[in-house]
Amino acid sequence: MNRATSALLTIAVLAGSAAAQSETITVEYDAPTMDRWNYPFNGSPGTRLSASTFGAVELDGFDDHDAQFILGFDTLADVMSGLDSSEYQVLSARVIITNTNGNVFRYDPTYDTHDTYLFLDNSLDTDDGRPVHLWAIGYQDEQSQATWGEYSAFGGIADVDPTQGSRYAFAAYFPFEGSDPVNISNNLKEEFDATPMAIAQNDTVLPGELVPADSDFTFDVDLCQPGIRNYLAEGLSLGEVRFAVSSLHAANGGDGGGTGEIAYPFWYTKENPLAVIFGYAPRLELTVRVGSPGDFNSDGEFNFFDVSEFLTSFNAGDTSADLNGDCQFNFFDVSQFLTAFSAG
């Protein structure tokens, strides 16, 4: 028995048991509570039957990620809200969306760097298709998750007319742990690469093939990306987790959406009758531990069984034992467990 294991077992014996402190919750949502085609010329936000994603590539006056799709899932009925974000440990998160249009865009399950979108007539992209991304959401101009919703105004004053840089809610990523959300809406013009939460995957279509209608695209959120666990935890504390979907399938903007040849996806929204009948609305699968990680097995007591399960998970490299969220298994996770366990 090594020293760390011995110390943990000794603490378990001395601690005995205490009141309930944590709960591990797995929930599945068949539809979002809010979804919105976040496009500057959308005259009916929150009520459309589908939402397209496309890019205004090489077009000044429009965001590169011109048409975005915003999703929000109310978790109040399943996960206690109002706790400090440190009380939520997201163990897994999966978002699923379904396309309405078929055989107009090609499947690409890999990230394309920003330079591959330049020179549309002579692209540097080495594979067919463009990926679909899942992002966090950031806000500007004094808007926030609490104030901006499904039917809110799109945005304010543009950086470049008519609409570039004006959106109140934008797809975002976190370049490092603890950073503010960075707007990725114009990463082509600003010449930087951003890492999404996930890239859409499909297990029935081969890369480069045209995508049939009613195909499910799955985003398994990469919890190792900087800031993502805390972003989701803050959403749970507010009672709603939100995501943005975007893709850079090239289109020309306009009042009715992308113009020219339609070679970009449309996604079912919760308002679509077919989505209601066939289950095509955006979906969320979420597993989260709420409360003290010291009650590791979520049985309401602090005792030997918590220590034993933590050690088993830690040695197996299970995500649940990565308590400090750095996607490494080391002394810092053990220290955090000991602190929480001893506090009871």
Image (cartoon, rainbow, N blue to C red):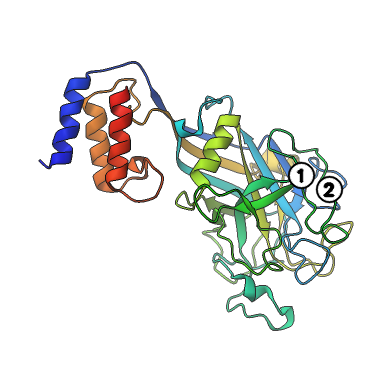
The residue furthest left is 1
**Circle 1 Cα neighbour tier, 10 Å, few/some/many (<14 / 14–19 / ≥20):** few
**Circle 2 Cα neighbour tier, 10 Å, few/some/many (<14 / 14–19 / ≥20):** few
Determine whether 140 is above or below 233 in the image.
Answer: below
Residue 296 in view, yes or no: no
Q: Position of residue 292 (x, y in %)?
A: 38, 28
The residue sitting at 69% across, 43% down in the picture is: 275
Q: What's the CA distance linking mark 1 and mark 2?
A: 8 Å
The residue sitting at 73% across, 61% down in the picture is: 54
- Position of 192 with respect to 168 (left or right) is left
Q: Residue under label 2, please give it.
A: 156
Q: Are marks 1 and 2 in contact (CB under 8 Å)?
A: yes
Nearest the viewer among 232 and 309 is: 232
What residue type is disc 2 on?
Gly
Residue 340 in view, yes or no: yes
Sequence-first tag of 1 and 2: 1
Kind of element beneath mark 2:
loop
Asked where in the image residue 278 lies, by quadrant, the reply is top right
Asked where in the image residue 107 lies, by quadrant, the reply is bottom right
What residue type is disc 1 on?
Asp
Res 141 label:
1
